[in-house]
């Protein structure tokens, strides 16, 4: 294997900076999609079906993009063309989604919004997967944990601003949180999506302009080594990580789908998405989501130091345990303001989820096929979300007793199961 030179912190920062914009758009989607869809008429029991489009498109798109980005060689390199294409498509979807009622002539805004949610997630995936592969492409093994941690930090920064933006626009710039016409989206959310589109494409352009990729001949030695291995094989660590990822992302899917209706019903006493209190709950959820993302950004650069002392498995297990207990602690509070405390714990878990599994995986897969394996590993993210989405209505009615708050408590249990599963993962750097 050819030896990759170490990169400086700012070189790693520049090559990952586009992730800030990607996560800005992703955060807007996570914090606002449920209330947008409910505004368009979606029933809370059926929200999981709309959210299914995200993991379904990711499951299809990421392995394909990974496969072709491994084999794409242009003047821009093999990953950067996909960054640009995904950024352009995502920006268009961000602009169109909150304007779905204006696009509805023969189809309901709810269906248009669901369709744009699918397009947005597919476009995000076109950019996201090559970013993961680029870290492994450019960095030597001993910098993988740092590389993915810097990505996590930028993800956190982008997500904080993206999650808080509707609240900021309302409370500091006077944008209304109440729709001017029933069935439409409030102006604070609409303008948040516009700003998100601009930031996303600008940050991607920054990475494309400041980061060069290695030419094809750098990988020639690795190709010769891989050709000796005629059989296709899946690394053992990747299979073991699937269990950890299943429980982690099953929990996260529940959080994204049900946090807004859960907090609105339990802490604000409303279930009607047209009620101003529901919109206030939605804005507060944006703040809470921003907090957990902000914590992940802060914790990201401490993860390599902790992992160096206790190992990556123990670091990840500890973070997931904190996240699980934080979800369970929602039961202890009667005022939504205090939910800031458990969201700090969720942020610790989120920071580790975005970095540690990829760091453990990157050291066990061949560089020439990095994009393909990273794309396949995305199945460990999409399958649990699809499972949750398919079973969601049954779970909501019969296990959660039609109470979205119970879905948050269940998320805590699944996160703790993920923590326990981490100790069964083999990591050569922990030996």
Image: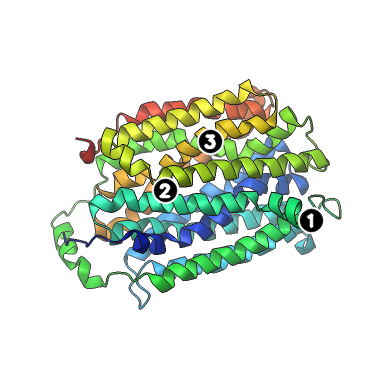
Verify CB contact (< 8 Å) between mark 1 and mark 2: no
Where does the N terminus fall, quadrant-wise?
bottom left
From what the image shows, is residue 362 above or below residue 101?
Answer: above
Mark 1 neighbour class, 10 Å CA radius: few under 14, some 14 to 19, many 20 or more: few
Q: Earlier in the sequence, mark 1 or mark 2?
A: 1
Label total for image: 3
How much space separates mark 1 and mark 2, taking CA atoms? 40 Å
Q: Which residue is mark 3?
A: 344
Q: Earlier in the sequence, mark 1 or mark 3?
A: 1
Identify the mark at residue 174; answer none if there is no mark: 1
Q: Position of residue 118 (x, y in %)?
A: 59, 54
The single residue placed furthest to the bottom in the displayed view is 75
The single residue placed furthest to the top in the displayed view is 332
Mark 2 neighbour class, 10 Å CA radius: few under 14, some 14 to 19, many 20 or more: many
Residue placed at 35% from the left, 78% from the top? Answer: 75
How much space separates mark 1 and mark 3, taking CA atoms? 29 Å
Q: Is residue 175 left or right of residue 347?
A: right
How much space separates mark 2 and mark 3, taking CA atoms? 26 Å
Number of the front mark, 2 or 3 = 3
Number of the front mark, 1 or 2 = 1
State the SS at label 3.
Answer: helix
From what the image shows, is residue 423 above or below residue 205?
Answer: above
Q: Is residue 335 left or right of residue 150?
A: right
Q: Position of residue 135 (x, y in %)?
A: 34, 57
Q: Earlier in the sequence, mark 2 or mark 3?
A: 3
Q: Which residue is mark 2?
A: 378
Residue placed at 37% from the left, 51% from the top? Answer: 148
Q: Can residue 382 be seen in the rendering of this structure?
A: no
Q: Position of residue 6 (x, y in %)?
A: 24, 60
Task: Determine which quarter of the picture holds residue 394.
Answer: top right
Mark 3 neighbour class, 10 Å CA radius: few under 14, some 14 to 19, many 20 or more: many
């Amino acid at each position: 294997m050819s030896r990759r030179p170490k990169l400086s912190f700012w070189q790693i920062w520049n090559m990952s900076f586009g992730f800030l914009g990607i996560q800005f758009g992703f955060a807007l989607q996570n914090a606002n999609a449920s209330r947008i869809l409910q505004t368009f008429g979606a029933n809370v029991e059926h929200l999981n079906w709309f959210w299914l489009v995200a993991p379904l498109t990711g499951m299809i798109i990421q392995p394909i993009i990974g496969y072709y980005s491994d084999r794409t060689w242009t003047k821009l390199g093999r990953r950067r063309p996909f960054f640009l294409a995904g950024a352009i498509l995502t920006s268009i979807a961000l602009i169109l989604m909150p304007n779905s009622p204006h696009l509805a002539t023969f189809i309901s805004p709810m269906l248009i919004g669901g369709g744009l949610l699918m397009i947005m997630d597919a476009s995000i995936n076109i950019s996201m997967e090559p970013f993961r592969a680029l870290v492994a492409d450019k960095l030597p093994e001993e910098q993988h944990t740092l590389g993915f941690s810097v990505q996590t930090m930028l993800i956190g920064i982008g997500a904080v601003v993206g999650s808080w933006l509707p609240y900021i626009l309302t409370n500091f710039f006077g944008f209304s949180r109440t729709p001017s016409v029933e069935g439409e989206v409030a102006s604070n959310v609409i303008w948040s999506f516009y700003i998100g589109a601009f930031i996303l494409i600008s940050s991607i352009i920054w990475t494309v302009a400041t980061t060069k990729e290695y030419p094809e001949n750098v990988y020639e030695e690795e190709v010769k080594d891989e050709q000796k291995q005629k059989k296709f094989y899946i690394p053992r660590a990747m299979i073991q990580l699937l269990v950890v990822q299943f429980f982690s992302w099953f929990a996260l899917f529940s959080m994204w789908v049900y946090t807004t209706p859960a907090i609105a019903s339990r802490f604000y006493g409303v279930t009607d998405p047209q009620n101003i209190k529901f919109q206030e709950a939605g804005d507060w959820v944006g703040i809470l989501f921003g907090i957990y993302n902000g914590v992940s950004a802060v914790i990201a650069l401490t993860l390599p130091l902790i992992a160096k002392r206790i190992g990556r498995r123990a670091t990840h297990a500890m973070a997931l345990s904190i996240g699980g207990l934080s979800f369970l602690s929602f039961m202890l509070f009667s005022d939504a303001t205090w939910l800031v405390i458990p969201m700090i714990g969720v942020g610790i878990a989120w920071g580790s989820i975005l970095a540690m599994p990829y760091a453990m995986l990157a050291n066990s897969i061949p560089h020439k096929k990095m994009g393909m394996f990273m794309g396949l590993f995305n199945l460990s993210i999409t399958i649990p979300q699809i499972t949750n989405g398919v079973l969601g209505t049954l779970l909501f009615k019969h296990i959660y007793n039609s109470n979205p708050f119970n879905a948050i408590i269940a998320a805590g249990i699944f996160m703790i199961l993920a923590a326990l599963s981490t100790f069964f993962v083999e990591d050569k750097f922990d030996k």
